[in-house]
Image: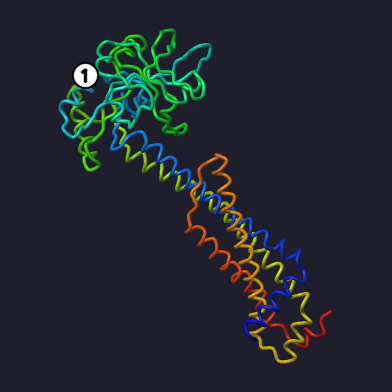
Amino acid sequence: MIISDLLEETFLALSSNKVRSGLTTLGIIIGISSVITMVSIGQGSQTSIQTSIQSIGANLIQVQPGSQRSFGGIATQRGSAKSLTTEDAQAIADEISVAQAVAPEVSSRYQVAAKGTNTNTSIVGTTSSYTEVRNVQVAEGSFITDQQQSSMAKVAVLGPTVSTDLFGEGVIPVGQTIRINGSQFTVIGVTVVKGGNSFSSQDDMIFIPLSTAQRYFSGDEYVTNISVQATSEKTVDQLETEITNLLLSRHTISDSASADFSLLNQADIIATASSVTETFTMLLAAVAGISLVVGGIGIMNMMLTSVTERTKEIGLRKAIGAKRQEIEQQFLVESVVLTLAGGIIGIALGLGISFVVSAIGIVNTSVSWSSVLLAFGVSATIGIVFGYYPARRAAGLNPIVALRYE
């Protein structure tokens, strides 16, 4: 049988019952589109998380008080203890050559009010080095200066989200006053929009001088975090080692297992987050892939039904000289055409859903063309695998029995 005749027979067979053919391909369409959508959401989430972490700063190590080890079954959580001081931060800056910039921080959430509006946000007391360490830029006004730090000035730099919440969209609040936990501050700047999510959003923060935060809010010399930027990506591990040794010496701790501080390496955070999101993406794809198997079973069921309905036709073809291979090819091509049609529609639907999900801002998506090619290949494979048995069954029918079939 020539290819044109084979395709013509396939078209006539499938179009003779359009509703059944359409419902049969529906399983493949849903499966393929689900796989593409779920993978794009997973990969988009992974990219978003990595971007969010990297936006915090490059080559960054964060030193936090306390540790995660347990004492008698009770864990000392990082950040909850008071073991790091501004002197520790100064020592890191002075004594470690691979530390390019150091920014100690005191942070907590407070109620902030301005002109009849209020919001609850994170107040970060820090120094002028923060802009370099955490990759922060100022859109309007200026950031905290060393002079303001030394004089304990009551000045504040607003994140764009806080600025909008307090003063409204499009208003430049530089020169305006706000009240943080009852204390009055003058706004001297607004930072550039960076975006972010619940993991970390520097847009929803207010920055004040570290000395001011320690005097009016925390009431002591301790800091809640020390951010240290390495001179390059290659020196991050060296920086981590030198910080550990320096702080152990300053805190007179001989055993590193008893350290009253802990270090977070940005590269380790990204690697961990990537591993989690990759696992999540694979899980989503596996769940969506189940519908492909269900769709394949639907294809086999339809083809078996078709073989039964066309038993006399098969017998007649064999009686006039059709070969076993030709009968087998006929039903196998029908199965493959069904799945490929479903695969093409499913790919288009999956791409469309991914675009819409990203466009309306539900979650960022990232379409992987490898997943599209994989989905298309899977659809073809399903057509062959699940269509093979019905095709073999049709080809194996006895022509005499088939002609007498009622």
* Relative to 275, residue 313 above or below: below
Whole-percent x, y for residue 90 in the image: 20, 22
Position of residue 52 measured from the top left corner of the image (x, y, whole percent): 41, 37
**Closer to the camera in the image, 208 or 375:** 208
Q: Residues within 10 Å of mark 1 (few under 14, many from 20)?
A: some
- Is residue 180 visible in the rendered image? The answer is no
Residue positioned 78% across, 75% down in the render: 309
Tell me which amino acid carries mark 1.
Answer: Glu
95 and 352: which is toward the camera: 352
Q: Is residue 141 left or right of residue 256?
A: right
Image point (19%, 33%), residue name: 242
Label 1, secondary structure: give it.
helix
Where is residue 345 shown, x and y percent of the image?
62, 60
Which residue shows up at 67% across the image and 66% down it? 299
Looking at the image, residue 307 lies above or below residue 142:
below
Q: Is residue 212 left or right of residue 114?
A: left
Using the image as rendered, state which of residue 2 and residue 175 is in the foreground. 175
Q: How is the image coloured?
A: rainbow
> According to the image, label 1 marks what residue?
87
